Structures are given as C-alpha cells and as structure tokens.
Image (tube, helix red, strand yellow):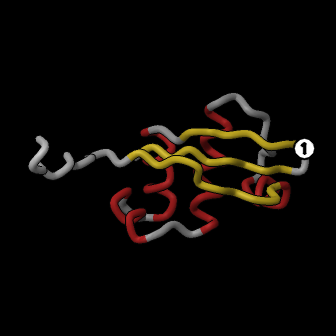
Amino acid sequence: MNITIRVTRNDGVYEVATNLMVVVLWERKYKLRASDLANGVAMEHLAYMAYEASKMANIVVPVSFDQFIKECAALEVVDSENPNPTESAATADN
C-alpha cells in the first residue's frame, strides 16, 4: 500500500509518498500489519510514515521524530493506492 501524505510544517507544505521500506519500518515499530491500515490510521502512525518517507525523499527533517511532530501543523492523506485493487463488476454494457 502506498500513501501520499501532504505535510504542512512551519516552513512550508510538501507531499511525500510512502514505499515498501516505509511500511516495513512502520510495521516493525508498531508491531502491526499493513492490512491493519484498512481499519483507519492513527495520527502518530501517519506522522511516522511522513517522517520516514521525508527522510527517504531527502527532505530535511529533525533527527528526533518528536521534534518533527512539533514542527507539523497538519498531515493529510491525499492519495491511497490499494495494493490489491478489485476489478469493477460486469454490467450489461460490458
């Protein structure tokens, strides 16, 4: 699952996308599975993904995760890609 997150920090706004490594780091830290995200995502989890994805995108962030959170005014999921999309149901037109 890839998620694009809009990060609003004190110094500006940018969008960052998660990747496999970010999701694995999140799973390791919180002892959850990526499939658990289907039930909703906690703000701390979203912040962690934004933090790790920002580092991987070479965006300068504080060394401390807590300091990163202090500098964030808002986090917003702007796009989410389902890893196993389902095909649309057949209709009379298909």
User: Is the residue 35 above or below the residue 18 in the image?
Assistant: below
**To which quarter of the image does residue 70 belong?**
bottom right
Judged left or right of residue 54, residue 84 is left
Identity of the residue furthest to the right in this view? 11
User: Is the residue 26 above or below the residue 57 in the image?
Assistant: below
Q: Residues within 10 Å of mark 1 (few under 14, many from 20)?
A: few
Placement of the C terminus among the 4 image quadrants: top left
Instruction: Choose between 55 and 29: the one closer to the eye.
Output: 55
User: Whole-percent x and y of residue 21?
Assistant: 46, 39
* Residue name at image x 79 percent, y 35 percent: 60
Q: Which residue is mark 1?
A: 11
* Residue name at image x 26 percent, y 47 percent: 84
Judged left or right of residue 8, residue 42 is left
Given the image, on which type of amino acid does mark 1 rest?
A: Asp
User: Whole-percent x and y of residue 93?
Assistant: 13, 43
Identify the element where label 1 is drawn: loop
User: Whole-percent x and y of residue 30?
Assistant: 49, 64
Judged left or right of residue 40, residue 45 is right
* Residue name at image x 47 percent, y 38 percent: 19
User: Whole-percent x and y of residue 7?
Assistant: 72, 49
